Image: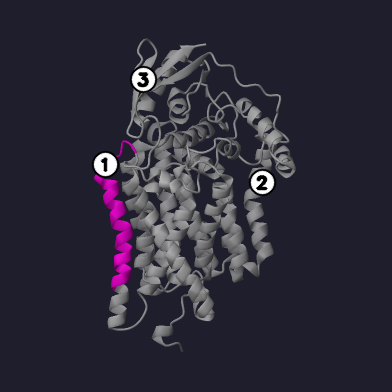
Amino acid sequence: MAAPSQRLPAEHGEVPRRGRGRALLWPVAVAAGSAVVFLGVKGSLIDDTYITLGYARNVAEHFHWGLVRAETANSATSPLNVVLLALGGTLTRVAGGRVHPVAGLGLIFVAAMTAAGWGFARIARALRLPFATAVAGTAAILLNPFVLSATGLEVHLISAALVLLTAYALEGRAIGFGVVAGLAVLVRLDLVVFVVLFALGAGALRRRLWPVAGVVAAVCVPWFVFSWFALGSAIPDTFLIKTTQGAFGEYTYGNGPVYYLDPKRWQATLISFGPAAAGLLALFGLAGWLLVRRQRAARFGPVAVLGLGGLAYYSAYSGLGVPPYQWYYVPPIVALTVVFVVVAGHVATLGHGFRRAVAVTVAVLAFTGVVLPAGYLDVRRGVPWTAPPIFGNWATAADYARVGEAIGARVGDATVAAPPEVGTLAYFCRCPMVDTFADQGRVVPLVDRRIAETGPVGSFLLRLDYHWLDRTREPRPAQYRLDWSWTPISGPGTWHLFSPATGNGWVRLVRI
């Protein structure tokens, strides 16, 4: 019989009797807290979120895949996010007889965070950590300004996926891991970095590699086959669009965190990356422990793999030289935050007597140093938000909504060539407002140019990916265009907008 200090964890799927009440109350608490947070941020959704919401509304209302009803497109980076938002929006019909995509987003937001909280509880149980580890980890992700500023994109699904992948890897559940891994790839294709590292780095998964691979393929491959034939490419067009955009001045993904250290965003940036920086240090410590005390530390191996996945992801994106969009940093931030929280939770279990008290104090200070500053920053700017703390759009969501509705009333079904930011305007216009995100005819020149510019291997892969795309397709003709100005303009069809990031701007509707 094992001594109390050596008590083995519960069998897979078994919840200790004393923890059953907590197992039921914890998801309810996370769902309630997440709902409150969503109500505070739902008015500040960024422009790229409205691209996703536009897709979701068209799927729910017309079973159509595209940002605008008039054109099929393949610019949705996260197909699973679109489908889930469409389902969420459809469920909200019971409240008003039509699709309510933002309310549907609220349901998915709450569900994703609840899944992350549930996954954290499983991690804590698998590693015999204090339950406070799950509370701190969930709160650290929920309140992180970088994550919260991209609400509506796939960031909360990413968080849930990474936490659940870690939990299933720790538990050695190969089939469950395979299902979550397949869904993770549908959340974002680049999460395959984490999937591969987990499958090769966690012994329980590596020993069942073929079943894991089979389940992953069964879950995600049908979508990519459908997308390849029906939408013109297996990989969304956003990969091509974003990799051809270049840097934000001197800043690419690699040095992008410095870009966000401007006077308006430095506090949110430091608070967002703080847990990840602590997680990086914790990862080094965990790696050293694995080298020195391999048998004792082996059970933490999947957590180390998660941290390595975050570093590999950051390195891969740095190599691509893509712009430093804030949501691109969410996977490494979340991965390293999990590492930090787990290691801090383990520190709280070390020693006895005075040493245990010191360890617990250190862990509590670490947890509060992560959670409290984020919560304070989120609330200090005023609730509900009109714009998130990490924000770069040329107008607030409310201003874009006002102008989009006005444009829709003027142009009807006529096609409008969009300004550089299309998502919110197109969503509220409900007209064919087009750019490369909405019209694949405008993607074709990008495909041809990239094929001509890249090397033999890259050219072959691009030709393969776009094999079924109609490359004779012409851009949709526009009857209007929207001209943007940073200096005051006036007259019919002219609107003033404001952004806390860029200041005042004006847009004019021009007949072509």
- Residue under the point 28% across and 77% down: 357
Query: Type of residue at label 3?
Result: Thr
* Residue at point 63%, 55% (across, down): 216
Q: Secondary structure beneath disc 1?
A: loop
Depth order, front residue of 291/180: 291
- Does residue 343 show up magenta in the picture? no
Distance, label 1 to label 2, CA atoms, is 42 Å
**Residue of label 1:** 383
Q: How many labels does the image show?
A: 3
Q: Which amino acid does label 2 sit on?
A: Pro
Q: What residue does disc 2 label?
A: 222
Residue identified by numbered label 3: 487
Could you classify mark 2 by the number of other residues whose Cα lies within 10 Å: few (under 14), some (14-19), or many (20 or more)? few
Q: Which is the main secondary structure of the residues drawn in magenta?
A: helix
Magenta range: 361-387
User: Residue 335, percent across and down?
Assistant: 47, 58
Asked if the residue under mark 2 is in contact with the one under mark 3, i.e. CB atoms within 8 Å, the reply is no
